[in-house]
Image (spheres, grey):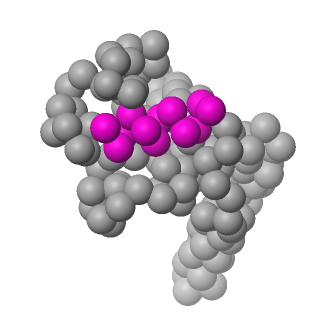
Amino acid sequence: MGSKRWAIIAALVGSGLMLFFNLWGRSLENHDYFRYAQVAKEMIFSGDWIIPRYNGEVFIQKPPLLSWLIAISAVTWGGLTPFLARLPGVLAAWGGGIVVYLWGRRIWGDKRCGWIACWVLISSHLYFDMGRIARTDMLFSFMILLSLYFFRLGYEEA
């Protein structure tokens, strides 16, 4: 039992290191990434967390969940950095990998199959790249994976 626990911990730490590696190394160079961070910054400074604003104008083109998560992480750690702007996307990608692991383990009845599915997902080029930038895509991907997984659980119980 001890070696299995260490294998699970090692896989979680390994996938986390893969996703978090050099996350703080680049600035927010793309306009989209910068926009979400700026909306979060304006939420913090204005105190208005309900209506997102970009350069003082109402910004309702995108759902505010990513901006809220960026702002919460910035308030928690005392400042907004490129790492904190990318943190919600990385955590969503990591969560998606865990959901795929649970799903694969449940379908095939083997932990190795679950880990293989998790590693294939996290090491996929587009999933890996989208998980390391500040965009809403990874949050949506995680929510869709989670809802499909829970649908499957409910379907199996019925």
Q: Quadrant of residue 130?
A: top right
Q: Which residues are magenta?
A: 31-42
The quarter of the rendered structure image containing the C terminus is top left
Please check the rendered image and state whether residue 32 is part of the magenta-colored stretch, yes or no: yes
Residue 4: where, in percent of width, then height? 61, 77
> Is residue 119 found left or right of 90 in the rendered image?
right
Q: Quadrant of residue 21?
A: bottom right
Residue 99: where, in percent of width, then height? 55, 44
Which of 45 and 123 lies nearest the eye of the viewer? 45
> Is residue 116 found left or right of 139 in the rendered image?
right
Q: Is residue 128 placed above or below 35 in the rendered structure?
A: below
The kind of secondary structure the magenta stretch mainly shows is helix
Q: Is residue 99 placed above or below 10 in the rendered structure?
A: above
Which of 25 and 114 lies nearest the eye of the viewer? 25
Identity of the residue drawn at 60% across and 31% down: 32
Residue 147: where, in percent of width, then height? 46, 27
